[in-house]
Image (cartoon, helix red, strand yellow):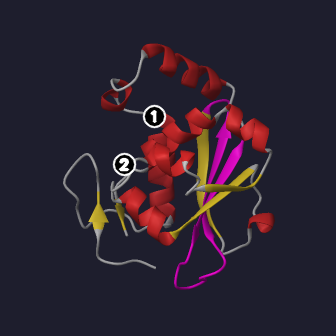
Protein backbone atom coordinates (compact mmCIF):
# COMPACT_ATOMS: atom_id res chain seq x y z
CA UNK A 1 0.00 0.00 0.00
CA UNK A 2 2.96 2.40 0.36
CA UNK A 3 5.82 3.54 -1.83
CA UNK A 4 8.92 5.52 -0.98
CA UNK A 5 7.46 8.94 -1.84
CA UNK A 6 7.06 11.31 1.10
CA UNK A 7 5.33 14.67 0.83
CA UNK A 8 4.69 17.74 2.94
CA UNK A 9 3.52 21.08 1.58
CA UNK A 10 4.76 23.26 4.44
CA UNK A 11 8.18 21.85 5.35
CA UNK A 12 10.81 19.61 3.85
CA UNK A 13 9.57 16.05 3.62
CA UNK A 14 11.09 13.53 5.97
CA UNK A 15 11.17 9.78 5.93
CA UNK A 16 9.54 9.79 9.36
CA UNK A 17 6.14 10.89 8.03
CA UNK A 18 3.49 8.28 8.72
CA UNK A 19 2.29 6.05 5.91
CA UNK A 20 -0.91 6.74 4.01
CA UNK A 21 -4.01 5.27 5.65
CA UNK A 22 -2.22 4.36 8.87
CA UNK A 23 -3.68 5.11 12.29
CA UNK A 24 -0.85 7.59 12.95
CA UNK A 25 -1.60 9.51 9.76
CA UNK A 26 -5.32 9.48 10.63
CA UNK A 27 -4.53 10.99 14.05
CA UNK A 28 -2.26 13.61 12.46
CA UNK A 29 -5.12 14.52 10.10
CA UNK A 30 -7.53 14.77 13.05
CA UNK A 31 -5.22 17.15 14.93
CA UNK A 32 -4.72 19.30 11.83
CA UNK A 33 -8.47 19.47 11.17
CA UNK A 34 -9.13 20.34 14.78
CA UNK A 35 -6.67 23.23 14.49
CA UNK A 36 -8.20 24.44 11.23
CA UNK A 37 -6.57 26.30 8.34
CA UNK A 38 -3.29 28.08 9.05
CA UNK A 39 -2.81 31.84 8.74
CA UNK A 40 -1.36 31.49 5.25
CA UNK A 41 -4.55 29.79 4.04
CA UNK A 42 -6.75 32.29 5.88
CA UNK A 43 -4.98 35.21 4.22
CA UNK A 44 -6.15 34.02 0.79
CA UNK A 45 -9.84 34.70 1.48
CA UNK A 46 -12.00 37.45 2.95
CA UNK A 47 -12.72 37.51 6.70
CA UNK A 48 -16.47 37.10 6.00
CA UNK A 49 -15.76 33.79 4.29
CA UNK A 50 -13.96 32.48 7.38
CA UNK A 51 -16.77 33.75 9.64
CA UNK A 52 -19.22 31.72 7.55
CA UNK A 53 -16.93 28.66 7.74
CA UNK A 54 -16.68 29.04 11.54
CA UNK A 55 -20.47 29.37 11.74
CA UNK A 56 -20.96 26.09 9.90
CA UNK A 57 -18.19 24.39 11.85
CA UNK A 58 -19.35 25.51 15.32
CA UNK A 59 -22.41 23.26 15.27
CA UNK A 60 -21.08 20.54 12.96
CA UNK A 61 -21.66 17.01 14.29
CA UNK A 62 -21.33 14.41 11.53
CA UNK A 63 -18.96 11.72 10.41
CA UNK A 64 -17.08 11.41 7.14
CA UNK A 65 -15.54 8.38 5.50
CA UNK A 66 -13.10 9.40 2.78
CA UNK A 67 -12.40 6.38 0.61
CA UNK A 68 -9.51 5.37 -1.60
CA UNK A 69 -10.29 3.10 -4.55
CA UNK A 70 -7.54 1.09 -6.22
CA UNK A 71 -5.25 0.02 -3.41
CA UNK A 72 -3.40 -3.19 -4.22
CA UNK A 73 -4.84 -5.17 -1.30
CA UNK A 74 -8.47 -4.50 -2.38
CA UNK A 75 -8.62 -2.80 -5.79
CA UNK A 76 -12.42 -2.59 -5.98
CA UNK A 77 -13.23 -2.17 -2.28
CA UNK A 78 -12.16 1.22 -0.86
CA UNK A 79 -10.28 1.75 2.37
CA UNK A 80 -11.44 4.83 4.31
CA UNK A 81 -10.19 7.61 6.51
CA UNK A 82 -13.05 7.91 9.01
CA UNK A 83 -13.48 11.25 10.80
CA UNK A 84 -15.97 12.01 13.58
CA UNK A 85 -17.01 15.61 14.22
CA UNK A 86 -18.83 16.73 17.38
CA UNK A 87 -19.83 20.34 17.98
CA UNK A 88 -17.25 21.62 15.51
CA UNK A 89 -14.33 19.53 16.75
CA UNK A 90 -12.80 16.58 14.95
CA UNK A 91 -12.81 14.20 17.90
CA UNK A 92 -11.85 10.87 16.37
CA UNK A 93 -10.05 9.52 13.33
CA UNK A 94 -9.50 5.95 12.23
CA UNK A 95 -8.92 3.79 9.19
CA UNK A 96 -11.74 1.49 8.05
CA UNK A 97 -12.13 -1.14 5.39
CA UNK A 98 -11.83 -2.30 2.82
CA UNK A 99 -15.59 -1.96 2.46
CA UNK A 100 -18.29 -0.79 0.09
CA UNK A 101 -19.90 2.62 0.81
CA UNK A 102 -23.13 1.11 2.17
CA UNK A 103 -21.10 -0.92 4.69
CA UNK A 104 -19.35 2.12 6.21
CA UNK A 105 -20.80 3.64 9.39
CA UNK A 106 -20.64 7.34 8.45
CA UNK A 107 -23.07 10.15 7.73
CA UNK A 108 -21.20 10.97 4.52
CA UNK A 109 -19.15 8.54 2.47
CA UNK A 110 -16.98 9.96 -0.28
CA UNK A 111 -14.37 8.28 -2.42
CA UNK A 112 -11.73 8.93 -5.04
CA UNK A 113 -9.28 6.80 -6.95
CA UNK A 114 -5.73 6.32 -5.73
CA UNK A 115 -4.31 8.63 -8.44
CA UNK A 116 -6.51 11.49 -7.20
CA UNK A 117 -5.39 10.92 -3.60
CA UNK A 118 -1.75 10.87 -4.71
CA UNK A 119 -2.15 14.18 -6.55
CA UNK A 120 -4.01 15.67 -3.60
CA UNK A 121 -1.46 14.62 -0.98
CA UNK A 122 1.51 15.55 -3.21
CA UNK A 123 0.06 19.06 -3.62
CA UNK A 124 -0.20 18.62 -7.38
CA UNK A 125 -3.76 19.93 -7.46
CA UNK A 126 -6.07 22.36 -5.70
CA UNK A 127 -7.89 20.41 -2.96
CA UNK A 128 -11.03 22.53 -3.34
CA UNK A 129 -11.20 21.69 -7.05
CA UNK A 130 -10.91 17.99 -6.24
CA UNK A 131 -14.12 18.44 -4.22
CA UNK A 132 -15.91 20.82 -6.58
CA UNK A 133 -15.12 18.82 -9.72
CA UNK A 134 -16.33 15.65 -8.02
CA UNK A 135 -13.05 13.77 -8.13
CA UNK A 136 -13.81 13.10 -4.46
CA UNK A 137 -17.40 12.03 -4.94
CA UNK A 138 -20.24 11.76 -2.43
CA UNK A 139 -21.42 8.13 -2.48
CA UNK A 140 -23.65 8.04 0.60
CA UNK A 141 -25.42 10.64 2.71
CA UNK A 142 -27.97 13.44 2.51
CA UNK A 143 -26.81 15.35 -0.58
CA UNK A 144 -28.63 18.59 0.24
CA UNK A 145 -27.37 18.72 3.83
CA UNK A 146 -23.83 17.90 2.72
CA UNK A 147 -23.72 20.61 0.08
CA UNK A 148 -25.06 23.22 2.49
CA UNK A 149 -21.68 22.95 4.19
CA UNK A 150 -19.58 22.22 1.10
CA UNK A 151 -17.12 25.08 1.62
CA UNK A 152 -16.40 23.89 5.14
CA UNK A 153 -15.76 20.41 3.76
CA UNK A 154 -13.58 21.76 0.93
CA UNK A 155 -11.47 23.76 3.39
CA UNK A 156 -11.10 20.64 5.55
CA UNK A 157 -9.80 18.73 2.53
CA UNK A 158 -7.35 21.60 2.01
CA UNK A 159 -6.09 21.16 5.58
CA UNK A 160 -5.91 17.39 5.18
CA UNK A 161 -3.81 17.76 2.03
CA UNK A 162 -1.06 19.54 3.97
CA UNK A 163 -0.55 16.79 6.56
CA UNK A 164 2.81 15.04 6.02
CA UNK A 165 2.40 11.53 4.66
CA UNK A 166 4.45 8.79 3.07
CA UNK A 167 2.62 7.54 0.00
Task: Rate crowding at label 1 as few (under 14), some (14 to 19) or many (20 or more) other CA atoms within 10 Å.
Answer: few
Nearest the camera: 30 or 125?
125
Which disc number belongs to residue 35? 1
Task: Rate crowding at label 2 as few (under 14), some (14 to 19) or many (20 or more) other CA atoms within 10 Å.
Answer: many
Left or right of 71? Residue 124 is: left
Left or right of 110? Residue 32 is: left
Q: Is residue 82 above or below residue 89?
A: below
Range drawn in magenta:
62-88
Residue 72 percent coordinates (x, y): 52, 85
Left or right of 12? Residue 125 is: right
How many numbered marks, from 0 up?
Answer: 2
Left or right of 156? Residue 83 is: right
Q: Residue 9 magenta-drawn?
A: no
Q: Is residue 80 above or below residue 55?
A: below
The residue that disc 2 covers is 162
Rendered image quadrant of residue 104: bottom right
Q: In which quarter of the image is the C terminus?
A: bottom left
Seen at 32% across and 62% down, the residue is: 17
Which residue is the extreme one toward the left? 12
Seen at 33% across and 27% down, the residue is: 39
Residue 75 percent coordinates (x, y): 59, 82
Q: In this view, does 76 lie above or below 61?
A: below
Q: Residue 81 magenta-drawn?
A: yes
Which residue is the extreme one toward the top? 48
Residue 115 percent coordinates (x, y): 45, 69
Amino acid sequence: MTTNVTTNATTNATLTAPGFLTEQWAEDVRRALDSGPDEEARATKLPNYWRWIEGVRSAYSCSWALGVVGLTDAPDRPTYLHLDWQDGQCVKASVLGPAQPDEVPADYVLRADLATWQRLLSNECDPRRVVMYRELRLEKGDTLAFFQGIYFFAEAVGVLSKVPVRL
